[in-house]
């Protein structure tokens, strides 16, 4: 297994870079850089490329609506060259509140758009003359624009003609498409005991159509981690607050993908309760309403022997990249310990 973590939103991105440098020395393999409605991910990734030597740098995620497919491909190729082949292109749809509310772009056809973006990116990296029909017509069809557009290919020769693409997917159709076309899957929350029940059919359908040259599907899984007893309760409080936000507040009623997956994992009543409380402004009550069993199953909080058992369960469920966000006063030391366990 590889070891990954999330670079958190911060008003001080330089501190986040220093953290990654320290964790790289402790064994970190992949740093994921988010882009919601904060600082953009690409600037941070370029700076990380200059300041690190070994760690892979992944966008976690670039929203598919905020860039043209060819710009996404160009950006990934640039970052791959700057980092010496350490770029991972993480893509995702984000959500209507961010895409329409912050970017002013209609949130529509996320799966079809992701599929076309993946295809266009790979054409660009192979230096083909780019053409595409569908949601992203390239070049513009006759009767649109000036009529002067013609198929072009990337001027540069990319360092790698097949940069790894990972997709953040939750719904069945999106998970199926990810298993078919992407190198890796970012599922957000993964309960190892529920992977087959919740995602198995979609994964199987996608893998049945997967090209052999893509290799095995890579998968992240893990969560907030604490192995020092005095950190157990702070870590659980942090987990409750975070999952209450996602389950309760990341979307409207009937349009919250995280809430839907939470319900499908066996928590239908709790899903409604948490969302109702959160949307009513009762955030602490929403966090308290999350079942203890759920918090235990989606975190890595407990004595080292227990955490190692949970890591083994994730590995058995297909996780290739252990994703951890430790709560500790000695974070590099914890990373080094976990790296030793999974090596």
Image: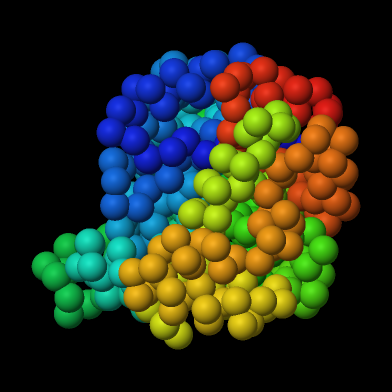
Q: How is the image coloured?
A: rainbow
Examine the rendering and report whether any part of residue 343 can be seen: yes
When asked about the image quadrant of residue 25, the answer is top right
Residue occupying the far left of the picture: 146
Which is nearer the eye, 232 or 49? 232
Which residue is drawn at the image coordinates 47% and 44% (left, top)?
59
Q: Is residue 97 left or right of residue 205?
A: left
Nearest to the observer: residue 136 or residue 131: 136
Residue occupying the point 60% across, 27% down:
328
Residue 24, placed above or below residue 162: above
Give the side of residue 191 with respect to residue 256, left or right.
Answer: right
Q: Position of residue 187 (x, y in %)?
A: 62, 59
Quadrant including the C terminus:
top right
Q: Is residue 246 above or below residue 320?
A: below
> Which residue is located at x 59 percent, y 66 percent?
290
Quarter of the image with the N terminus in it: top right
Front residue of 19 and 126? 19
What residue appears at the point 66 percent right and 39 percent down from the top-left corner? 232
Q: Position of residue 220 (x, y in %)?
A: 67, 49
Q: Using residue 219 as the reference point, say whether residue 269 is left or right of it.
A: left
Vertical placement of residue 275 versus 193, above or below: below
Is residue 96 placed above or below 238 in the rendered structure?
Answer: below
């Amino acid at each position: 297994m590889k070891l990954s973590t999330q670079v958190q939103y911060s008003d001080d991105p330089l501190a986040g870079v220093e953290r990654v440098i320290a964790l790289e020395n402790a064994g970190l393999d992949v740093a994921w850089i988010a882009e919601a409605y904060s600082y953009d991910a690409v600037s941070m990734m370029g700076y990380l490329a200059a300041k690190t030597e070994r760690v892979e740098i992944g966008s976690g995620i670039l929203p598919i609506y905020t860039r043209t497919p060819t710009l996404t491909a160009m950006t990934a190729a640039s970052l791959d060259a700057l980092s010496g082949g350490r770029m991972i292109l993480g893509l995702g749809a984000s959500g209507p509140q961010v895409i329409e509310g912050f970017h002013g772009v209609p949130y529509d056809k996320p799966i079809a758009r992701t599929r076309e973006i993946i295809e266009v990116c790979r054409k660009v990296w192979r230096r083909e003359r780019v053409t595409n029909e569908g949601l992203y017509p390239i070049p513009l069809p006759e009767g649109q624009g000036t009529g002067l557009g013609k198929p072009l290919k990337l001027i540069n020769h990319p360092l790698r003609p097949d940069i790894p693409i990972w997709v953040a997917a939750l719904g069945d159709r999106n998970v199926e498409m990810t298993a078919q076309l992407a190198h890796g899957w970012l599922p957000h929350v993964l309960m190892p005991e529920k992977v087959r029940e919740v995602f198995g059919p979609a994964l199987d359908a996608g893998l049945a159509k997967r090209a052999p040259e893509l290799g095995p599907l890579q998968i992240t899984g893990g969560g907030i981690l604490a192995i020092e007893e005095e950190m157990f309760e702070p870590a659980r409080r942090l987990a409750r607050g975070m999952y209450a936000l996602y389950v309760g507040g990341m979307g409207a009623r009937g349009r919250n993908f995280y809430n839907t997956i939470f319900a499908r994992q066996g928590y239908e009543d709790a899903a409604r309760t948490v969302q109702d409380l959160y949307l009513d402004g009762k955030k602490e009550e929403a966090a308290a309403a999350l079942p203890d069993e759920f918090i235990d199953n989606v975190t890595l909080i407990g004595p080292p022997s227990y955490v190692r058992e949970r890591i083994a369960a994730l590995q058995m469920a297909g996780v290739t990249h252990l994703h951890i966000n430790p709560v500790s006063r000695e974070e590099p030391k914890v990373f080094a310990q976990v790296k030793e366990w999974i090596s």
